[in-house]
Amino acid sequence: SEDFQAAAAGGLGLVLRELDDQRVMVARALPDGAGAQAGIAAGWEVVSIDGVAVGDAISAIVPYTAPFSTPHNLRLEQVRFLLRGEEGARRLVEFRKPDGTVEALTLTLRFDADGFFASAFSQEDDDSSGLPVRYSVLDSGYAKIDITSFSDDLPLTVALWERALLQAKADEVRGIILDIRQNGGGSGFLGDQLPAYFFDQDYVIGNRAEYSALRDSFVVNPLLEERFILPDPALRYDGEVVVLISPDCASACESFAYAMTVNDRAVIIGHYPTAGLGGSVVPIAMPDGTEFYYTNSRSLGADGEINIEGKGVAPTLRVPMTEEVLFSGRDVLLETAVDYLRGGLSANVPEQGQSAPDAAAQAITIGQTVSGTVTPDAPARYTLTTAAATRLDIVATGEGATERGLVVRVLRPDTLGVLSENYALPGEPTRAGFRALAFPANLTVIIEVASAAPTVSGTYTLTITEVK
């Protein structure tokens, strides 16, 4: 559109990705792009733009593709638009090369449609069949079922799905990997009910809440409670299942991913949660043939809580976005799925170099603030126990050398396996941790504050507060 031409048509032909340690790397430099022609190559790190530190520059970006339901999708698009702008605009960009030297370049943005599409987190499906469900057997002996859409012909999708599961049983595969990373959603029925083929009980999946003007509140109709519709037992698959997700898994795709977490049926693997689009939408016809969509209901889990909207379905086995992963040239998520099915990984992957359980961790309570010091080899750990179900803000604020280099983890107290971790909070680059993280009653965990990079040492303040 003309707005896009004015706001973001200019670029450098660079694909950028932010790592978990908050470094921003050039993942690709398109050969015909202005960046590559200026000598910039994959592996260079973006340090600053027009004199502004890269983290602050990212946080200030308002992406043309906004708005977003989740902070992680917003951040990914902010990085995508970091070096985009009007054609002819100039940027002073400071890079750190792989050999550690720093170089500042003044670069002119030029029309860059190729760079815009190449930098999208999702990429075009290279399968020419166009089928929404595809079955294959990997060299490892595991089956892989790609589900690329829930918007295709419904009977066709169900038929292909049942055929794939019957083939997996006939092939006697050792497990199934469900790849829904590039599924933008569609039929809510498919998203809810295709997972039923992995269950032998009609579990409650959830419900939805709709606003009532008469009651001035959201109302749940128990008669609309959603349950699995169990298929013929001959179609049921009882083996191990892994689900691959990404931020491009949206809407009904997220319903599918959420349903596969019921009774811990499958391990969910990804770098990031899904898109967080968990509500029914209603279209309104507008002038000039356009349509406006608004969300008219809340998607709820079996516990009555919002289960997708605003947060997405999180990986139960998260693969960190590291420099090694970014430049591996491999499908690391698929490799992780195979390793898990082989028994090489637990559902909560411990960090490299992680020590044995720390019985000496200091106790901390809700409402308490503590200060401490961390080094790359010595994280700080605190034992936290919840008496009742609650939501907590767990925030570590860095000071000086740690201002932008902390990570906060929630660990199992027995093995120190990582239950969840987070780096900079959206819009709060000097703070790491969680906002409104849900905890069940009578749970004991270890809260770890650690250095996010080998060069980070210093002091911090950790605060744990209850969200009312």
Image (spheres, rainbow, N blue to C red):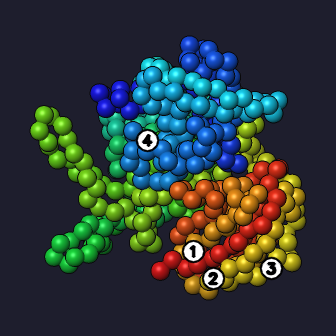
Percent across and percent down for residue 135 are 54, 31
Nearer to the camera, 318 or 361: 361
Q: Quadrant of the N terminus?
A: top left
Check disc 1 and report its element: helix, strand or loop. Answer: strand
Q: CA distance from mark 1 to mark 4?
A: 29 Å
Percent across and percent down for residue 328 are 73, 31
The residue that appears at 53% across and 49% down in the rendered structure is 59
The residue that appears at 53% across and 70% down in the rendered structure is 436
Q: Dot 2: few (<14), some (14–19), or many (≥20) neighbours within 10 Å?
A: some
Q: Which residue is mark 4?
A: 63
Mark 4, mark 2: which one is toward the viewer?
4
Q: Which residue is mark 2?
A: 366
Residue 169: numbered disc: none
Q: Which residue is mark 1?
A: 392
- Residue type at numbered disc 1: Leu
Q: Are marks 1 and 4 in contact (CB under 8 Å)?
A: no
Percent across and percent down for residue 277 are 40, 52
Q: CA distance from mark 2 to mark 1?
A: 8 Å
Please indicate whether residue 456 sits to the left or right of residue 444 in the image: right
Q: Dot 4: few (<14), some (14–19), or many (≥20) neighbours within 10 Å?
A: many
Check disc 3 and report its element: helix, strand or loop. Answer: strand
Q: Please identify the residue farthest to the left as the structure is shown.
A: 287
